[in-house]
Image (cartoon, rainbow, N blue to C red):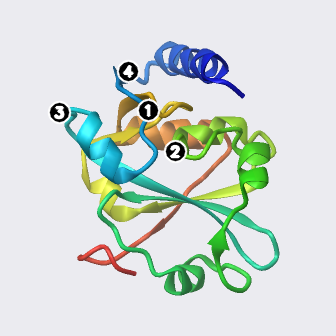
Amino acid sequence: MNLSDDLRKSDELLAHLTAKGMEPVTTEHPPVFTVEEARKLRGQIDGVHTKNLFLRDAKRNYFLLVTDEDAIVDLNALARKIGARGRLSFGSLEALLELLEVQPGSVSLLAACNDTAVRVTVVLDERILSGRVINCHPLTNTRTTSLSQENAIAFLRSSGHDPIVVSLGADGDI
């Protein structure tokens, strides 16, 4: 996959969101691969900024955790909360490309559109739902798209992903 493919897919996703009345607002920026890079390069974008972890359990069940960019996640505690079978670990690059069809650094709740077989369980930290606007990458790490909380949930449900909502605690720790 190259950048022009990523941007084409991103354009198609943004057009779909617009056609569904979800009113995405998208900001272009240089590529970002980490939360720290995103903070430096994204500029002023209001709302909750997300951190996304692509995870798997011992039985190769896959999860996408979407949390606040400042959250610290205890994978063992998270595994118990979401009913994972065995320990959680990070999913492989191969699984990420196969299931969500995005490159590292571009993972977000919007990648659920590529999981048509619904093999990935989306897990939302309730803290991101406390904000009015959720910011995420639209299949490329050169853009940040802002959606209302309601439209982000509606998007997930329309893609067949009814998210699990968990509490990571007041300080971001599970």
Which tag, 3 or 4, sits closer to the chain's start? 4
Which dot marks residue 60? Answer: none
**Quadrant of residue 167 in the image?**
bottom left
Q: Is residue 174 above or below residue 13?
A: below
Classed neighbour count for the residue bearing mark 2: other residues with Cα under 10 Å, few (<14), some (14–19), many (≥20): some
Seen at 82% across and 76% down, the residue is: 59
- Residue 41 x %, y %: 28, 35
- Residue 143 x %, y %: 42, 27
Q: Which residue is mark 1?
A: 31
Nearer to us: label 3 or label 1: 1
- Residue 152 x %, y %: 44, 39
Q: Which residue is mark 2?
A: 105
Q: Which residue is mark 3?
A: 44
Q: Which residue is mark 4?
A: 23
Identify residue type, mark 2.
Answer: Gly
Identify residue type, mark 1.
Answer: Pro
In the displayed structure image, the side of residue 95 where residue 132 appears, left or right: left
Identify residue type, mark 3.
Answer: Gln
Q: Nearer the viewer, residue 28 or 56?
A: 28
